[in-house]
Amino acid sequence: MCGICGQLHFADGAPVDPALLRRMTDSIAHRGPDDVGMHLDGALGLGFRRLSIIDLAGGHQPMSDPAGETWVVFNGEIYNFSELRKELEGHGHRFRTRSDTEVIVHGYRQWGPGVLDRLNGMFGLAIWDSVRRRLMLARDRAGIKPLYYSLEGGRLTFGSEIRPLLVARGGRPEPDPAAINLFLKYRYTPAPLTVFRGIRKLAPGTCMIVEGGEARIERWWRFQPRPFAPPPSPDEARERLLELYAQAVERQLVADVPLGLLLSGGLDSGLLLALMNRCGRDWKSFTVGFGAGAPGDELAEAARTAQLLGADHSEVRIDQATFEEVLPRIIGILEEPVAAPSVVPMYFVCELARRRVKVALMGQGPDELLGGYTRHLGVYYGGLWRALPDWARRPLRNGLDRVRPREALRRGLYALEEPDRARRYERVFAIQPEDWIDALFAPDVLADAGPISLAACWDGLTGLSSELDELGGLQFLEIRSSLPDELLMYADKLSMHHGLELRVPYLDHDVIEYAECLPSSYKVRRGRRKWLHAEVCRRFLPAEVLNRPKRGFAVDTEGWLRGAVDSQLHRQLADPASLMYELLDHRAIQALLAEHRAGHGVNHKLLYSLVALESWLRQFCERAPVAAE
């Protein structure tokens, strides 16, 4: 687990400045405190920072083959590297280290860019083929590890974070109004966009190849799920899913350093702990909460799960004052505004875990894969609503327009009535109608942005999901868009800020590809979410864990932000000199704020997004930071 960066002058072949490459590499020192390395080859420069996990003595990067023709910098873990090594040795390759990085080097020598299809793992990587003068950047299938880039004037600059790109560009970064518009609508910035003008990120399962003076982006993971015909029986599906879970957990427990688990009180992390126990005992577990009486707190439940399953458990408590104090710092670490309040507890639980382990597993994935969100119920049953004639839907719709506490249901019906499937999915993700968000922008700010569409960022994905039903199609996009660009992004950056590697066994690509071919009736059944996943959990978890309500590292945003908006965070929104008002209409935002304070609207999600946006603007668009705070 590491940080990578680099630059290629592919148009004029000018040499890369070693001092600049050093500064770029230093800007991500927090990602790799154990080692540093660089490789220069005329117009190409590669930088690397290492957090040592496997082969502590022999995994130095950049790494090359014996002839020095192929060079790799790599952030992540390849879980099947032992199997690939044996296969490559059968082809005559000889290895000098025990590291997974060397498998990528020799794999490229054997299979070229096709090596990506053989990797089981999480990665953001760069491969330099000095013979062909070809640079390939690639991101793993699920987008667990990020990779950013900019293409300007025949120069490619890239990095595991945005910081090296800002160092290379210099000057004052400029916000991208179109990306900010999408962030306020959907609470995340979809690939390939970032909120920095001119800086982009590779989408999950894609690669960029720069060769012959040209750069092209390709989707290397082109899995097209087709529903099983006939589908497996429920028992067969449960046993196969369990088998895939167990295989993924066993693979991801390989490390030469201590491992642990981020543990909530729910099913997903509880099942991970039970499966980890099949491979060993006395695992260390970690959780975060707000104390007894706080809405959504699960400190006691997580501790009880750890006790029942035999983990060595630790916890950390935070409060509202801590939340407000640390939020700006966290936005700085994330480099982009993120509207998930769970970034604050994630920051603290990663800090806690790093005191005792260097690697931790977490239970991200089953909600997106197997129908764990409330929106999945709406999408699954939405066809019943659309089947009603308009005269039957109109009275209920009009009634909900007047009942503000049912805002989520009203927005859900607004989304499900859209006849076009892609547009319907956009509305499911939106926190408010799109034209309503557009109206918050100051005049002419979006004039040069062109059409702004989440569906445009899904280009190439909707065709791959064409054989899936309504719920399956939405989940296909969640796995490849909202999950990596929000939840996995902040998990990566907050963990790496503390020198902790996070692994997500449920997002093993074998698990993803199996789950995506299952019937939606195995995901949502008789109003129950994650039905099949819960059936697997019944094999391992006691009844008191199974019967708990669904939770995560939750934050009572509405309650907390109502108080927070009256204090420090409120002052940011109320201040007409706030930087957001270079883009947004001050009067429109004040109307939102007044409505929220009076209790007449449910705007806390949007207000929180605005607070995150203002914090980002103050940290990045007044100056260009070169290192994480």
Image (tube, rainbow, N blue to C red):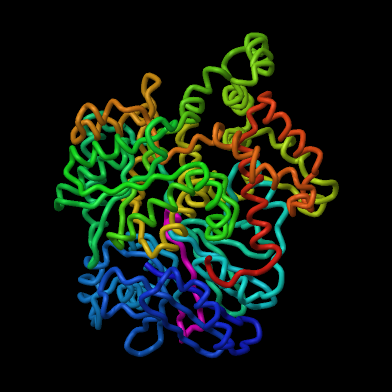
Task: Give the image location of residue 582, x and y in percent.
Answer: 79, 53
Judge by depth and name the residue closer to the eye, 529 or 51. 51
Answer above or below: position of 31 versus 182.
Answer: below
Residue at position x 29%, y 34% from top? 301
For the magenta stretch, what is the residue range? 128-144
Residue at position x 65%, y 32% from top? 603
Can you say which quadrant of the picture contains the N terminus?
bottom left
Report whether 600 appears left or right of 133.
Answer: right
Residue at position x 56%, y 18% from top? 385
Report whether 473 appears left or right of 519.
Answer: right
Answer above or below: position of 291 versus 335.
Answer: above
Task: Give the image location of residue 506, x and y in percent.
Answer: 33, 47
Task: Give the image location of residue 572, x and y in percent.
Answer: 69, 47
Is residue 10 something one can see in this rendering? yes
**Residue 318 within the magenta-colored segment of the rendering:** no
Tell me the quarter of the picture where residue 202 sits.
bottom right
Is residue 221 something one can see in this rendering? no
Extreme residue toward the right, this view:
443
**Residue 133 within the magenta-colored segment of the rendering:** yes
Task: Give the image location of residue 350, x and y in percent.
Answer: 38, 55
Judge by depth and name the residue closer to the eye, 425 or 608. 608
Report whether 161 appears left or right of 575.
Answer: left
Tell me the quarter of the picture where residue 77 sits.
bottom left
